[in-house]
Image (spheres, helix red, strand yellow):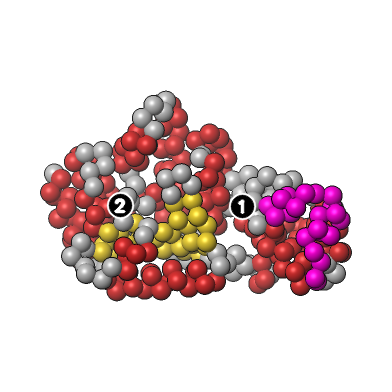
Amino acid sequence: MTAGSTIPRRMLGRRLKQLRERSGVSQAAACRAIEIAPQTLWRIETGQPGPKLKDIYVDTLCRLYSAPEDDAAVLIGLVAETKSPGWWHAYGDAVPTDFDLYLGLEEAACRLTTFQIALLPGLLQTADYRRAMIWATFPSMPTVEVERRIELALKRQVRLRETPGQFSIRAYLSEAALRHRVGGSAVMADQLHHLVAASQLPTVALQVVPLTVEMPMHLVAGSFTLLEFPSHPTSRLTEPPVVYVEGYTGALYLDKPGEIDRYKLACKAIRAAALSEHDSRQLILDIAREFE
């Protein structure tokens, strides 16, 4: 599957920044070399969408940074990959602006670890559950647009049918997320049975943190998703892990080593507090019967 332009942009930008800093070339000198504004250079080096990347830009910067020839060749090769749109771009306005980056990361990831306090993760939602969420958030959204978003959400779930070596997800769910009535009792009963079925896929591991747990780490950490990526043939281009924290009006993408380490520790603490996969399925079925 293709990750569109997201990962190639991030790999290219990160490596260019490393080469610039290693060479001692200033940002101002780099900007002058290819005649761009400082803000544009920042967007290139951080893998942001927008700036048009050209072979000549990358070649000029690599020469300025005295980069090895093999480095330059690989980076110039990435330029073409940054122009390949992801499959989700066909959905146009159905993809919120701040969610485009996440979709590219999710598509490229080989492993997701997510903890959700209030709502269920998108990869495990039913169409009716997702529809209820959209109507609650955007009550005046046209039905056609709502259904396009549903179609997009369901297409993301194709990854669950891949082999565990290609993709896997470990989902930790607060019991509260299982009890909030999103869409009403019938929708929730169906959603919880869907969770149990999904948890038996080889790519899915699902554990519930019961409300009776006294250890508060999961409440301190809040909802998050840790994305990890496969190794790249050129090791220095391997995408480092990213933590995605979704907000009401935007999102955070955390990738500093210290930040990743903190969230990995949170994952260990949450796992220790969670029920086993077997007991989690039993609890989910019990709650489903309450909705029925």
Against 59, residue 98 (above or below) is above
Residue 118: mark in rendering: 2
Q: Which residue, given by chain and number where applicable, does mark 1 sit on?
A: 6
Give the magenta range: 23-44
Judge whether 278 appears above or below 84 on screen: below
Q: Residues within 10 Å of mark 1 (few under 14, many from 20)?
A: many
Q: Nearer the viewer, residue 139 or 29?
A: 29
Residue 10 seen: yes
For the C terminus, the image quarter is top left
Q: Which mark is residue 189?
A: none
Name the dominant secondary structure of the magenta segment: helix
Q: Residue at coordinates 46% horizontally, 44% vertically from top-left? A: 249
Asked if residue 167 lies left or right of residue 128, the reply is: right
Task: Say which element carries label 1.
Answer: helix
| 256 vs 148, nearest the viewer | 256
- Disc 1/disc 2 C-alpha distance (Å): 28 Å
Q: Residues within 10 Å of mark 2 (few under 14, many from 20)?
A: some
- Which percent across, then down, holds residue 245? 45, 56
Instruction: Residue at 56% x, 67% y: name it.
Output: 256
Q: What secondary structure is found at the residue carrying circle 2?
A: loop
Quadrant in the rendering for residue 30:
bottom right
- Residue type, numbered disc 2: Ala
Q: Amino acid at mark 1?
A: Thr
For image coordinates 65% across by 57% down, the residue present is 46
Is tag 1's residue or tag 2's residue first in the polypeptide sequence? Answer: 1
Q: Residue at point 33% right, 51% down?
A: 120
Whether residue 190 is visible, yes or no, is no
